[in-house]
């Protein structure tokens, strides 16, 4: 039997997935701006982020309405709650892309220093995690979500390795420090993207298995 | 309170999410209860405790047997022609189902509030005083006055009626009449209060007052409530039992039932997929 709540949750899912695809796209564009030393592309990132913010606000309003009018429970409630959390993660991804665009804008005005391949490897890993986390949500796929969680440590290791490499470069040639610091900031932002992808994967598990696994390792250690 | 979502691993201890609490003691207990209306098997082998500390809500689609089952706890089904109840029901571990049980005394200990308020066609004061008088709870007029005041205060009605205790009970609003019926039940010092959709005939304000009252009475009385209003069950109860086609499908902490029910039928019912 169709429920009055079914179109409500369908619309929310649609808005969230739209926000997800725009977050992936803005992240790709920010990295392209860095690679191509393109200020216009970096400026586009700022403009694109406004659409993500608009979707975030629209999701907030739709969720408030759904809670007030439909009083969802059980799986419906878990999904509504998680949609809000995932939207917040995606909005942050948009902000991180803007940070990367800011670094790209600064780099464009400096002496050319190609970002090393290790940074692009980190970028591919982070974007891949975000894409798979969103796929896991769209397909209600717990296995894919768990795979995303497994990859978080890999991205952390790639980031640490990259930062160590850049610090060594700076030690060898202080003149490259401004550019290298921006690349380190980009790496840091990418590592944060991976963290948000992890959060999304955790939300998928909460929706499907009603199991809250957030901070499990940290809280376990603090026992 | 038991938390609704599980939290992984030992982390739960740090946030208290999985810390199990001892089962609250049962004031009343039903074991393997069946109810038949002639050939119709209305309640099928239901076992359920009514906790001393918590409010227990019975939910389920119309005709699932929840009101029939509720009535077993003070033997109201005895008065229905053709109705037969089997199984064990205890109050403080003492069987209430035997023929030696004084049903009038049982109904004083296990009071009932119905869907529609039915005050006696008497004054407000007489409605509350009637029970204590026939049960011999007051020897002097002053004692009866005290019981009337205490019961009306407990029901949150005293301030509204203190100046017109002689007025006819049916001059009160629907919500006030329902609280009067609760005061009437409280006047005979019950240990258990059964409520069969007590707010279904009331407006939202009167409903909110009854729900506040249930919360205030919780802990002092064992309370079981049948309700069609799922949000009401979520608001007022700590334990929820879901019945379907006469069977008890699932019982557990209300927070668990409404966020992560174990049974698909419960999930389908509370999310409006059927019922």
Image (cartoon, rainbow, N blue to C red):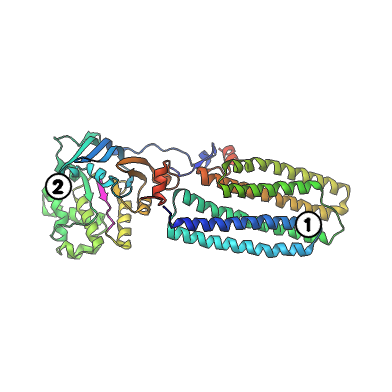
Depth check: give the residue in front, B22 or A62.
A62
Left of A159 or right of it: where is B188? left
Q: Which structural element holds mark 2?
A: loop
Name the residue carrying label 1: A34
Does residue B221 appear in the picture of this structure?
Answer: no
Depth check: give the residue in front, B177 or B250.
B250
Image spot of residue B275 (x, y percent): 35, 50
Image spot of residue B102 (x, y percent): 14, 39
| Figure quadrant of residue A4 | bottom left
Depth check: give the residue in front, A66 or B206.
A66
Does residue A140 appear in the picture of this structure?
Answer: yes
| Residues packed near mark 2 inside 10 Å, few (<14), some (14 to 19) or many (20 plus) | some
Left of A206 or right of it: where is B114? left
Q: Residue at x 60, y 43 (%)?
A: A145
Which label is found at residue B137?
2
Left of A109 or right of it: where is A187? left
Start-end of magenta stretch: B192-200
Residue A64 vs B244, above or below: the answer is below
Q: Residue at x 58, y 50 (%)?
A: A138
Magenta stretch: includes residue A196:
no
Image spot of residue A41 (x, y percent): 76, 62
Depth check: give the residue in front, B14 or B275.
B275
Image spot of residue B14 (x, y percent): 53, 40
Q: Residue at x 44, y 60 (%)?
A: A68
Which label is found at residue A131?
none
- Residue at the far front: name it: A1
Which corner quadrant holds the N terminus of chain B? top left
């Amino acid at each position: 039997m169709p429920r009055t709540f079914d179109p409500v949750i369908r619309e929310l899912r649609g808005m969230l997935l739209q926000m997800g695809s725009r977050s992936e796209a803005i992240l790709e564009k920010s990295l392209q701006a860095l690679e191509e030393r393109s200020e216009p592309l970096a400026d586009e990132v700022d403009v694109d982020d406004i659409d993500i913010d608009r979707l975030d606000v629209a999701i907030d309003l739709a969720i408030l309405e759904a809670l007030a009018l439909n009083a969802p429970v059980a799986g419906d409630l878990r999904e509504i709650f998680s949609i809000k959390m995932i939207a917040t993660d995606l909005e942050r991804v948009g902000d991180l892309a803007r940070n990367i665009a800011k670094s790209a804008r600064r780099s464009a005005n400096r002496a050319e220093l190609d970002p090393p391949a290790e940074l692009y490897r980190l970028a591919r890993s982070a974007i891949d995690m975000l894409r798979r986390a969103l796929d896991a949500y769209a397909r209600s796929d717990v296995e894919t979500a768990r795979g995303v969680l497994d990859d978080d440590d890999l991205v952390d290791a790639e980031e640490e390795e990259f930062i160590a490499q850049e610090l060594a470069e700076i030690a060898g040639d202080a003149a490259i420090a401004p550019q290298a610091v921006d690349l380190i900031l980009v790496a840091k932002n990418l590592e944060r993207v991976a963290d948000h992808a992890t959060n999304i994967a955790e939300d998928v598990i909460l929706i499907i298995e009603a199991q809250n696994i957030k901070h499990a390792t940290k809280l376990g250690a603090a026992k | 309170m038991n938390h609704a979502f599980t939290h992984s691993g030992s982390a739960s201890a740090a946030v208290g999410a999985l810390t199990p609490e001892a089962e609250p003691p049962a004031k009343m207990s039903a074991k393997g209860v069946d109810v038949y209306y002639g050939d119709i098997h209305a309640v099928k082998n239901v076992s359920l405790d009514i906790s001393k500390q918590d409010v227990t809500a019975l939910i389920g689609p119309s005709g699932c047997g929840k009101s029939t089952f509720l009535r077993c706890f003070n033997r109201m089904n005895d008065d229905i022609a053709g109705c037969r109840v089997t199984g064990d029901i205890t109050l403080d571990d003492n069987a209430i189902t035997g023929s030696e049980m004084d049903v009038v005394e049982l109904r004083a200990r296990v009071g009932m509030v119905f869907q529609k308020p039915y005050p006696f066609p008497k004054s407000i004061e007489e409605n509350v005083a009637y029970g204590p008088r026939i049960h011999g709870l007051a020897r002097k007029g002053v004692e009866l006055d005290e019981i009337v005041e205490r019961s009306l205060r407990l029901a949150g009605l005293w301030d509204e009626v203190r100046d017109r205790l002689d007025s006819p009970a049916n001059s009160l609003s629907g919500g006030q009449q329902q609280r009067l019926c609760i005061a009437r039940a409280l006047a005979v010092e019950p240990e258990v209060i059964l409520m069969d959709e007590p707010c279904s005939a009331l407006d939202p304000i009167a409903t909110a007052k009854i729900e506040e009252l249930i919360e205030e009475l919780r802990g002092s009385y064992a309370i079981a409530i049948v309700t069609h209003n799922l949000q009401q069950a979520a608001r007022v109860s700590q334990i929820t039992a879901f019945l379907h086609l006469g069977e008890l499908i699932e019982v557990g902490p209300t927070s668990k039932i409404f966020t992560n029910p174990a049974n698909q039928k419960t999930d389908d019912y509370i999310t409006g997929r059927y019922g």
